[in-house]
Amino acid sequence: MSRIILMAIMLAVTVAGCNRFPDLTIQVTANLAPDESNCAIDANQELVLLRGLYDIGPDAPEFDYFLTPRIESYLVQNGLEIQAPQANMTITGFDLTIKLPDGSVPDFGEGLPNPYSVTSNAVIPPSDAIGGVSRGAAAAPVIPSSYRQSIIDALNTSGFNSIVLDVRANGTTAGGFSQQSPPFPWPIEFCDGCLGVECAAGEVGDGVGCFPGQDRWGYCDSIVPPVAP
């Protein structure tokens, strides 16, 4: 009888485990700072950003606000025999919620859902050893430019000058197992003209750096007049 019970328990575990891996298989752990020379991102780099900065000045270009997150995977190659083979984790996108600092979720009206989802693409290989961590880097337009004015209106109404972006990564393994990360809170402050810089050439609104008008990358708000010979 005990042998039958043991077999029943093993069958139950197998059935329960066939739908997904345990929670916390993937996590968003940081927002990486792209290399200023070529805007590339390295999942293992040390340079990360601590907060976002979004310029809403009149000369700031309208843009999609990008996040370049580091995503960690805790899957192990050739893991449990009772589950499908564990292989690469493909990050397919992010679920996002714009929140005010008090935790409330503003309603932006028809056509601008909140929460919402965006797509992305990154592949994270499994770790070779139990307890190991594999890292990947992704990029995604987490705040489309179409949300800009509605966010500004919500800030004006509430009196706040910042938001918190709730970021959850979605991934799928080659074996068809889906996983979602816990929320990664990303604070973003709004400012008027704080990322504008003088440019020696070009036009007002031209971008300087990787993502004009956001985080630490500027845009031309004035042109330095040429020096007379």
Image: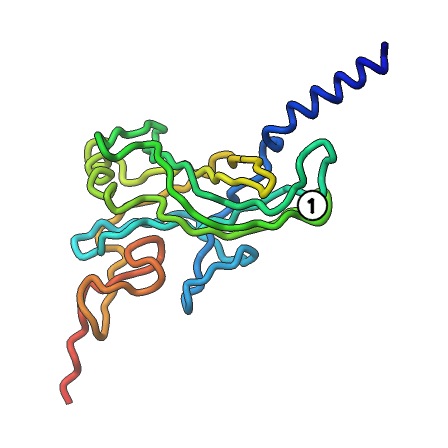
Residue found at the far bottom of this picture: 229
Quarter of the image for the C terminus: give it. bottom left
Q: Residue 109: percent from the left, percent from the top? A: 22, 30
Could you say which is closer to the camera, residue 37 or residue 119? 119
Is the residue 45 above or below the residue 145 in the image?
Answer: below
Q: Is residue 51 left or right of residue 135?
A: left
Colouring scheme, one of rainbow, by chain, secondary structure, one colour? rainbow
**Residue at numbered disc 1:** 77
Identified at 66% across, 23% down, the residue is: 15
Q: Residue 21 at what x, y percent from top left?
A: 61, 33
Q: Foreground residue, 128 or 19?
A: 19
Please tell me whether mark 1 sits on a helix, a strand or a loop: loop
Query: Mark 1 Cα within 10 Å, few/some/many (few <14, many 20+)?
Result: some
In which quadrant will I find the N terminus? top right
| Residue 42 rendering spot, x and y as whole percentages | 52, 59
Number of marks present in the image shown: 1
Whole-percent x and y of residue 116? 35, 35
Say which amino acid is labelled 1: Gln
Location of residue 112 by image quarter: top left
**Quarter of the view holding residue 227:** bottom left
Q: Residue at x 35, y 57 (%)?
A: 216
Residue at x 51% of width, y 34% of height:
182
